[in-house]
Amino acid sequence: MTDADRALGLLLEGFKLSRMLGLVAESGIPDLIPLEGKVPATALTSAGTQPDALLRICRALAAFGVFTVSPDGMIGHSAMSRLLRTDVENSQAVAARFWCGAGNWAAWGALDAGLHAGESPHQVAWGMSRFDYLRAHPDEAAVYDSRMATASGDRQAAIVAAGDFGRAGTVVDVGGGNGALLRAILAACPAARGIVFDRAHVVSTIKPEALLDGRIRAEVGDFFVGVPKGGDLYLLSWILHDWRDDDCLRILRSCRAAMAPNTRLMIAERVLEPDPTRGNPLDYLGDIQMMVLGGRERTVAEFAALLAATGFSTPKVTPTGSIVSLLDSRAI
């Protein structure tokens, strides 16, 4: 067997590893194993597991460096399995649960709908969009929200560090969710104020104290219909990748209609390198994840085309310390 045979074989069977990782994270197994020392599988039954099955799964994962399993069946942590605990820095526990959640797992099973019919695999698998599905499955929605908060490292801090926010009097965060990014921006710009704009069920979860004593105003609406007027800077953070091009054009036109000429638009998104030999492999996996959910990641040229079609200037691109870059444009 050649190295290429082995490498391709591991890729083909990689779904088995993903499923096992998601299952042990969902069951809370990593938190039950002490950081130091080893325990038998029978000591982990509080997670509702069968000892023999758990031992076999941990042994299979240990063959790939996740957990350690001694010949006598004692289970301990490895450097990677420690990252599946919920109480460690840079924990991947939520990521493991997110990728293998029922909604995402079944949608990937319908990937052929995207390849052959240009349809959203999630829509085919569940008969509804990703966001409708999450509204109907609050437990998975909670995992999704946690994943979005940590998916790109400290995205808020990275955006604040890389972006030019000092001259903005009013920042409008379009589709701003719980307002976490807007609060980070305002913390760095004491003279600025902000509007967090999102659907009613999202905005309703923002606690009064999160509005920074009136510096933030929460507004309810639909960015396909219109967005608040009067901002100096409009922000779209991890919004456009959720949507196909025609929907992105609608969102951008809504923003442009609210903006005076020369008002700034800042897009925070993952930017694809057109040459996959030069890009981060995870970026391209992220693009297919968005295909599964009905959206897409984009290159600079693809972002520029959307902006040109909706009345915005060619974007200036600034990398951040996270996986997203900032695309800074102006209303023409």
Image: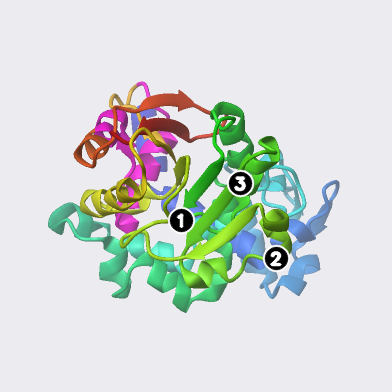
Q: Position of residue 80 (x, y in %)?
A: 66, 42
**Residue identifier under label 3:** 193
**Residue 175, which numbered label?**
1
Q: Quadrant of the C terminus?
A: top left
Marks 1 and 2, Cα distance to the nearest angstrom?
A: 18 Å
Q: Earlier in the sequence, mark 2 or mark 3?
A: 3
Q: Which residues are magenta?
A: 278-304
Residue sitting nearer the eye, 101 or 301: 301
Label 2 vs label 3, nearer the camera: 3
Foreground tag (1 vs 2)? 2
The CA span between labels 1 and 3 is 17 Å
x, y (%) of residue 3?
39, 27
**Extreme-left residue of the structure:** 117
Was residue 255 drawn as part of the magenta stretch in this picture?
A: no
In the image, residue 241 above or below residue 104 = above
* Residue at the image point whose x is 46% and y is 32% from the top: 325
- Type of amino acid under label 3: Arg
Q: Amino acid at mark 2?
A: Pro
State which tag comes first along the sequence, 1 or 3.
Answer: 1
The residue wearing badge 2 is 208
Position of residue 328 measured from the top left corner of the image (x, y, whole percent): 41, 31
Determine whether the residue tagged by mark 1 lies in a helix, strand or loop: loop
Q: CA distance from mark 2 to mark 3?
A: 15 Å
Left or right of 82: which side holds 308? left
Q: Residues within 10 Å of mark 2 (few under 14, many from 20)?
A: few
Examine the rendering and report whether any part of residue 2 can be seen.
no
Secondary structure beneath label 2: helix
Q: Residues within 10 Å of mark 3 (few under 14, many from 20)?
A: many
Type of residue at label 1? Gly
Decide if residue 29 is in sight here. yes
Query: Outermost residue toward the bottom?
Result: 136
- Establish if 239 lies above or below 43: above
